[in-house]
Image (cartoon, grey):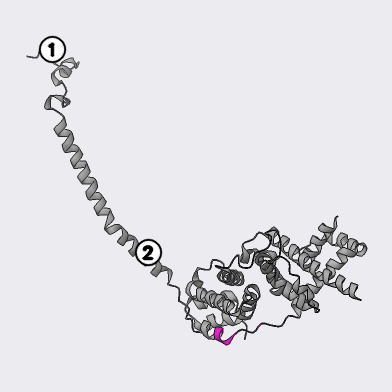
Amino acid sequence: MQQKTDQELLALMRGGSQKAFAELYRRYRSGLYAFCFRLLGNRDEAEDAVHETFARLAASGASIAEPRALKAWLYRVARNEGLMGRRHNGATGDADSVWAEDTPQSIAERADTRSLVREAMERLRVEYREVLLLREFEGMTYDEITEVTGASPASVKSRLFRARRALAGLLENVRNEERNMQ
Amino acid sequence: MTCDEIQAAISAYADGALLTGEEGDMFVHIGTCAACRRFFGSVLDIRSTVVAATPVDVPESLDKRVLAIRPRAARPLAQRRRWLTEIWMRRLSVPLPSAALVALALISITIFSLSLLLKPSEVPLLTLPTVDVYAEHPDAPQHIE
Protein backbone atom coordinates (compact mmCIF):
# COMPACT_ATOMS: atom_id res chain seq x y z
CA MET A 1 0.00 0.00 0.00
CA GLN A 2 1.33 3.43 -0.92
CA GLN A 3 2.25 5.55 2.04
CA LYS A 4 0.22 8.71 2.45
CA THR A 5 2.01 12.04 2.47
CA ASP A 6 1.97 14.38 5.46
CA GLN A 7 -0.40 16.64 3.55
CA GLU A 8 -2.85 13.84 2.91
CA LEU A 9 -2.74 12.70 6.53
CA LEU A 10 -3.20 16.26 7.73
CA ALA A 11 -6.23 16.66 5.47
CA LEU A 12 -7.73 13.44 6.88
CA MET A 13 -6.95 14.58 10.40
CA ARG A 14 -8.81 17.84 9.74
CA GLY A 15 -11.82 15.68 9.03
CA GLY A 16 -11.43 14.20 12.51
CA SER A 17 -9.55 11.01 11.56
CA GLN A 18 -7.91 9.49 14.63
CA LYS A 19 -6.08 7.00 12.38
CA ALA A 20 -4.39 9.79 10.41
CA PHE A 21 -3.37 11.54 13.63
CA ALA A 22 -1.90 8.29 14.99
CA GLU A 23 0.02 7.76 11.75
CA LEU A 24 1.52 11.26 11.94
CA TYR A 25 2.52 10.58 15.53
CA ARG A 26 4.16 7.26 14.61
CA ARG A 27 6.00 9.00 11.78
CA TYR A 28 7.58 11.70 13.96
CA ARG A 29 7.58 10.36 17.51
CA SER A 30 11.12 8.92 17.59
CA GLY A 31 12.93 11.84 16.00
CA LEU A 32 10.94 14.43 17.92
CA TYR A 33 11.37 12.72 21.29
CA ALA A 34 15.11 12.13 20.72
CA PHE A 35 15.56 15.79 19.71
CA CYS A 36 13.73 17.02 22.81
CA PHE A 37 15.61 14.61 25.07
CA ARG A 38 19.01 15.63 23.67
CA LEU A 39 18.09 19.31 23.77
CA LEU A 40 16.62 19.32 27.29
CA GLY A 41 18.61 16.46 28.83
CA ASN A 42 15.56 15.29 30.75
CA ARG A 43 13.14 12.48 29.86
CA ASP A 44 10.10 13.91 31.63
CA GLU A 45 10.49 17.34 30.08
CA ALA A 46 11.03 15.75 26.66
CA GLU A 47 7.88 13.67 27.08
CA ASP A 48 5.82 16.70 28.10
CA ALA A 49 7.14 18.75 25.18
CA VAL A 50 6.26 16.05 22.65
CA HIS A 51 2.85 15.44 24.23
CA GLU A 52 2.05 19.14 24.16
CA THR A 53 3.17 19.34 20.53
CA PHE A 54 0.76 16.62 19.40
CA ALA A 55 -2.01 18.03 21.59
CA ARG A 56 -1.60 21.29 19.69
CA LEU A 57 -1.55 19.45 16.38
CA ALA A 58 -4.83 17.74 17.30
CA ALA A 59 -6.43 20.99 18.44
CA SER A 60 -5.23 23.36 15.74
CA GLY A 61 -3.87 21.22 12.93
CA ALA A 62 -6.30 22.97 10.61
CA SER A 63 -4.54 26.28 11.19
CA ILE A 64 -1.14 25.10 9.95
CA ALA A 65 -0.50 27.54 7.14
CA GLU A 66 1.87 25.34 5.15
CA PRO A 67 1.07 21.61 5.51
CA ARG A 68 4.17 20.72 3.46
CA ALA A 69 6.29 22.11 6.28
CA LEU A 70 4.66 19.95 8.95
CA LYS A 71 8.01 18.55 10.15
CA ALA A 72 9.43 22.03 10.76
CA TRP A 73 6.15 23.02 12.50
CA LEU A 74 6.33 20.02 14.85
CA TYR A 75 9.99 20.63 15.73
CA ARG A 76 9.36 24.33 16.26
CA VAL A 77 6.46 23.72 18.63
CA ALA A 78 8.36 20.99 20.51
CA ARG A 79 11.42 23.22 20.82
CA ASN A 80 9.40 26.18 22.06
CA GLU A 81 7.42 24.05 24.50
CA GLY A 82 10.59 22.45 25.81
CA LEU A 83 12.54 25.65 26.19
CA MET A 84 9.68 27.70 27.63
CA GLY A 85 10.65 28.87 31.06
CA ARG A 86 14.11 27.41 30.95
CA ARG A 87 15.75 29.43 28.21
CA HIS A 88 18.57 30.64 30.39
CA ASN A 89 18.93 27.54 32.51
CA GLY A 90 22.55 26.54 32.84
CA ALA A 91 23.75 29.45 30.78
CA THR A 92 26.07 30.76 33.44
CA GLY A 93 29.16 31.19 31.31
CA ASP A 94 30.36 34.06 29.16
CA ALA A 95 27.64 35.20 26.76
CA ASP A 96 30.12 35.02 23.87
CA SER A 97 31.03 31.45 24.70
CA VAL A 98 29.43 28.47 23.04
CA TRP A 99 29.54 26.59 26.36
CA ALA A 100 26.69 26.73 28.83
CA GLU A 101 29.15 26.36 31.71
CA ASP A 102 32.48 28.07 32.19
CA THR A 103 34.81 25.31 31.00
CA PRO A 104 33.80 21.75 30.30
CA GLN A 105 37.16 20.39 31.49
CA SER A 106 35.67 17.46 33.39
CA ILE A 107 34.40 15.85 30.19
CA ALA A 108 37.84 16.16 28.59
CA GLU A 109 38.91 13.33 30.87
CA ARG A 110 36.76 10.89 28.91
CA ALA A 111 38.92 8.38 27.11
CA ASP A 112 36.39 7.56 24.42
CA THR A 113 36.14 10.18 21.67
CA ARG A 114 32.48 9.46 21.03
CA SER A 115 31.39 9.83 24.63
CA LEU A 116 33.49 12.98 24.84
CA VAL A 117 31.79 14.49 21.80
CA ARG A 118 28.37 13.42 23.07
CA GLU A 119 28.89 14.93 26.49
CA ALA A 120 30.48 18.06 25.05
CA MET A 121 27.40 18.55 22.87
CA GLU A 122 25.24 18.41 25.98
CA ARG A 123 27.31 21.22 27.50
CA LEU A 124 26.88 23.59 24.57
CA ARG A 125 24.65 26.61 25.07
CA VAL A 126 21.15 25.81 23.88
CA GLU A 127 21.32 28.02 20.75
CA TYR A 128 24.40 26.09 19.57
CA ARG A 129 23.18 22.69 20.73
CA GLU A 130 19.84 22.94 18.96
CA VAL A 131 21.33 23.80 15.55
CA LEU A 132 23.88 21.00 15.86
CA LEU A 133 21.19 18.48 16.84
CA LEU A 134 18.88 19.54 14.02
CA ARG A 135 21.69 19.44 11.48
CA GLU A 136 23.59 16.32 12.57
CA PHE A 137 20.80 14.11 13.92
CA GLU A 138 17.82 15.26 11.88
CA GLY A 139 19.73 16.13 8.72
CA MET A 140 17.84 19.42 8.35
CA THR A 141 18.96 22.09 5.88
CA TYR A 142 19.77 25.66 6.97
CA ASP A 143 16.32 26.77 5.78
CA GLU A 144 14.57 24.08 7.81
CA ILE A 145 16.63 24.94 10.90
CA THR A 146 15.66 28.57 10.33
CA GLU A 147 11.99 27.52 10.32
CA VAL A 148 12.42 25.68 13.62
CA THR A 149 14.61 28.10 15.56
CA GLY A 150 13.69 31.45 14.06
CA ALA A 151 17.39 32.27 13.54
CA SER A 152 18.50 33.54 10.12
CA PRO A 153 20.27 31.10 7.74
CA ALA A 154 23.50 33.09 8.18
CA SER A 155 23.18 32.79 11.95
CA VAL A 156 22.49 29.05 11.68
CA LYS A 157 25.63 28.62 9.56
CA SER A 158 27.71 30.68 11.97
CA ARG A 159 26.41 28.83 15.07
CA LEU A 160 27.15 25.46 13.47
CA PHE A 161 30.69 26.58 12.69
CA ARG A 162 31.28 27.92 16.20
CA ALA A 163 29.85 24.79 17.82
CA ARG A 164 32.01 22.53 15.66
CA ARG A 165 35.09 24.59 16.34
CA ALA A 166 34.47 24.42 20.09
CA LEU A 167 34.04 20.64 19.94
CA ALA A 168 37.10 20.32 17.71
CA GLY A 169 39.15 22.39 20.16
CA LEU A 170 38.12 20.10 22.97
CA LEU A 171 39.01 17.01 20.97
CA GLU A 172 42.38 18.47 20.09
CA ASN A 173 43.19 19.19 23.75
CA VAL A 174 42.44 15.57 24.62
CA ARG A 175 44.59 14.28 21.78
CA ASN A 176 47.47 16.56 22.80
CA GLU A 177 47.25 15.24 26.38
CA GLU A 178 47.25 11.69 25.07
CA ARG A 179 50.36 12.41 23.01
CA ASN A 180 52.12 13.95 26.02
CA MET A 181 51.31 10.91 28.16
CA GLN A 182 52.88 8.52 25.66
CA MET B 1 42.10 32.50 2.46
CA THR B 2 42.82 32.44 6.20
CA CYS B 3 42.50 29.33 8.40
CA ASP B 4 39.33 30.84 9.95
CA GLU B 5 37.75 31.17 6.52
CA ILE B 6 38.86 27.66 5.52
CA GLN B 7 37.41 26.16 8.72
CA ALA B 8 34.12 28.00 8.11
CA ALA B 9 34.19 26.51 4.62
CA ILE B 10 34.84 23.02 6.08
CA SER B 11 31.78 23.46 8.33
CA ALA B 12 29.65 24.55 5.36
CA TYR B 13 31.06 21.64 3.32
CA ALA B 14 29.88 19.23 6.04
CA ASP B 15 26.40 20.72 5.61
CA GLY B 16 26.48 20.47 1.83
CA ALA B 17 26.27 24.26 1.69
CA LEU B 18 29.64 25.10 0.13
CA LEU B 19 29.77 26.71 -3.29
CA THR B 20 31.39 24.56 -5.97
CA GLY B 21 34.26 26.98 -6.64
CA GLU B 22 35.27 27.14 -2.97
CA GLU B 23 35.66 23.39 -2.62
CA GLY B 24 38.94 23.20 -4.58
CA ASP B 25 40.58 26.00 -2.58
CA MET B 26 39.49 24.34 0.64
CA PHE B 27 41.02 20.95 -0.19
CA VAL B 28 44.26 22.54 -1.45
CA HIS B 29 44.56 24.39 1.87
CA ILE B 30 43.76 21.26 3.92
CA GLY B 31 46.58 19.48 2.08
CA THR B 32 49.11 22.01 3.33
CA CYS B 33 47.74 23.07 6.76
CA ALA B 34 47.87 20.65 9.70
CA ALA B 35 45.48 22.72 11.89
CA CYS B 36 42.75 22.78 9.25
CA ARG B 37 43.34 19.10 8.54
CA ARG B 38 42.78 18.35 12.23
CA PHE B 39 39.62 20.47 12.20
CA PHE B 40 38.36 18.54 9.18
CA GLY B 41 39.05 15.28 11.06
CA SER B 42 37.16 16.55 14.12
CA VAL B 43 34.12 17.47 12.01
CA LEU B 44 34.14 13.90 10.69
CA ASP B 45 34.47 12.61 14.28
CA ILE B 46 31.39 14.58 15.30
CA ARG B 47 29.49 13.10 12.35
CA SER B 48 30.57 9.55 13.20
CA THR B 49 29.52 10.08 16.83
CA VAL B 50 26.06 10.98 15.61
CA VAL B 51 25.90 8.01 13.25
CA ALA B 52 26.91 5.65 16.07
CA ALA B 53 24.58 7.27 18.61
CA THR B 54 22.29 4.87 20.44
CA PRO B 55 18.66 5.47 19.46
CA VAL B 56 16.58 7.07 22.17
CA ASP B 57 13.64 4.88 23.17
CA VAL B 58 10.26 6.56 23.25
CA PRO B 59 8.54 5.81 26.59
CA GLU B 60 5.28 3.87 26.44
CA SER B 61 3.66 6.46 28.66
CA LEU B 62 4.11 9.05 25.89
CA ASP B 63 2.50 6.74 23.32
CA LYS B 64 -0.49 6.24 25.60
CA ARG B 65 -0.87 9.93 26.36
CA VAL B 66 -0.65 11.05 22.74
CA LEU B 67 -2.80 8.30 21.25
CA ALA B 68 -5.54 9.15 23.76
CA ILE B 69 -5.86 12.60 22.14
CA ARG B 70 -8.75 12.97 19.71
CA PRO B 71 -8.13 15.37 16.82
CA ARG B 72 -10.67 18.16 16.56
CA ALA B 73 -12.38 18.16 13.18
CA ALA B 74 -12.16 21.50 11.41
CA ARG B 75 -15.54 23.23 10.87
CA PRO B 76 -16.61 23.62 7.23
CA LEU B 77 -16.08 27.09 5.77
CA ALA B 78 -19.79 27.86 5.38
CA GLN B 79 -20.40 26.96 9.01
CA ARG B 80 -17.46 29.13 10.09
CA ARG B 81 -18.85 32.06 8.07
CA ARG B 82 -22.33 31.64 9.59
CA TRP B 83 -20.77 31.56 13.03
CA LEU B 84 -18.80 34.72 12.28
CA THR B 85 -21.97 36.46 11.00
CA GLU B 86 -23.80 35.49 14.18
CA ILE B 87 -21.00 36.90 16.31
CA TRP B 88 -20.94 40.06 14.19
CA MET B 89 -24.71 40.54 14.51
CA ARG B 90 -24.59 39.79 18.24
CA ARG B 91 -21.85 42.34 18.69
CA LEU B 92 -23.82 44.99 16.79
CA SER B 93 -27.29 44.30 18.19
CA VAL B 94 -26.74 46.06 21.53
CA PRO B 95 -24.15 48.82 21.02
CA LEU B 96 -25.46 50.21 17.72
CA PRO B 97 -29.02 51.10 18.82
CA SER B 98 -27.64 52.39 22.13
CA ALA B 99 -25.18 54.65 20.34
CA ALA B 100 -27.98 55.91 18.05
CA LEU B 101 -30.18 56.78 21.04
CA VAL B 102 -27.36 58.64 22.79
CA ALA B 103 -26.55 60.58 19.59
CA LEU B 104 -30.23 61.51 19.12
CA ALA B 105 -30.48 62.71 22.73
CA LEU B 106 -27.36 64.86 22.37
CA ILE B 107 -28.64 66.47 19.16
CA SER B 108 -32.03 67.23 20.78
CA ILE B 109 -30.39 68.79 23.86
CA THR B 110 -28.14 70.95 21.66
CA ILE B 111 -31.05 72.28 19.57
CA PHE B 112 -33.14 72.97 22.67
CA SER B 113 -30.25 74.83 24.38
CA LEU B 114 -29.63 76.99 21.32
CA SER B 115 -33.31 77.91 21.05
CA LEU B 116 -33.29 79.10 24.67
CA LEU B 117 -30.11 81.17 24.24
CA LEU B 118 -31.21 83.06 21.11
CA LYS B 119 -33.78 85.89 21.49
CA PRO B 120 -36.55 86.09 18.83
CA SER B 121 -35.04 89.37 17.40
CA GLU B 122 -31.67 87.63 16.89
CA VAL B 123 -33.22 84.93 14.82
CA PRO B 124 -31.96 85.59 11.28
CA LEU B 125 -34.62 86.77 8.82
CA LEU B 126 -34.76 84.27 6.04
CA THR B 127 -37.72 85.76 4.09
CA LEU B 128 -36.81 87.52 0.83
CA PRO B 129 -38.10 91.01 -0.04
CA THR B 130 -40.34 89.59 -2.72
CA VAL B 131 -41.92 92.94 -3.75
CA ASP B 132 -38.57 94.58 -4.61
CA VAL B 133 -37.34 91.62 -6.52
CA TYR B 134 -40.57 91.44 -8.49
CA ALA B 135 -40.40 95.17 -9.27
CA GLU B 136 -36.89 94.93 -10.67
CA HIS B 137 -37.84 92.18 -13.04
CA PRO B 138 -38.05 93.31 -16.73
CA ASP B 139 -41.42 91.56 -17.25
CA ALA B 140 -42.98 93.17 -14.19
CA PRO B 141 -45.85 95.68 -14.69
CA GLN B 142 -44.75 99.29 -14.44
CA HIS B 143 -47.17 100.41 -11.74
CA ILE B 144 -47.70 98.47 -8.66
CA GLU B 145 -49.82 99.82 -5.92
Residue B19 can be seen in this image: no
Does label 1 lie on the same chain as label 2?
yes
In the picture as drawn, the residue positioned furthest to the left comes out as B145
Q: How much space separates mark 2 and mark 1, taking CA atoms?
A: 75 Å
Say which residue appears at 28% left-offset and 54% top-offset: B96
Say which residue appears at 84% left-offset and 70% top-offset: B41
Picture coordinates of residue B91, whole percent (x, y): 32, 59
Q: Amino acid at mark 2?
A: Leu
SS for dot 1: loop
Quadrant where the N terminus of chain B is found in the figure: bottom right
Q: Residues within 10 Å of mark 1 (few under 14, many from 20)?
A: few
Residue for badge 2: B84
Whether residue B61 appears in magenta in the rendering, the answer is yes
Residue segment shown in magenta: B56-62
Q: Pointer 1 indicates a residue of which chain?
A: B
Q: Is residue A130 left or right of residue B103?
A: right
Q: Amino acid at mark 1?
A: Gln
Kindly indicate the quadrant of the structure image that contains residue A150: bottom right
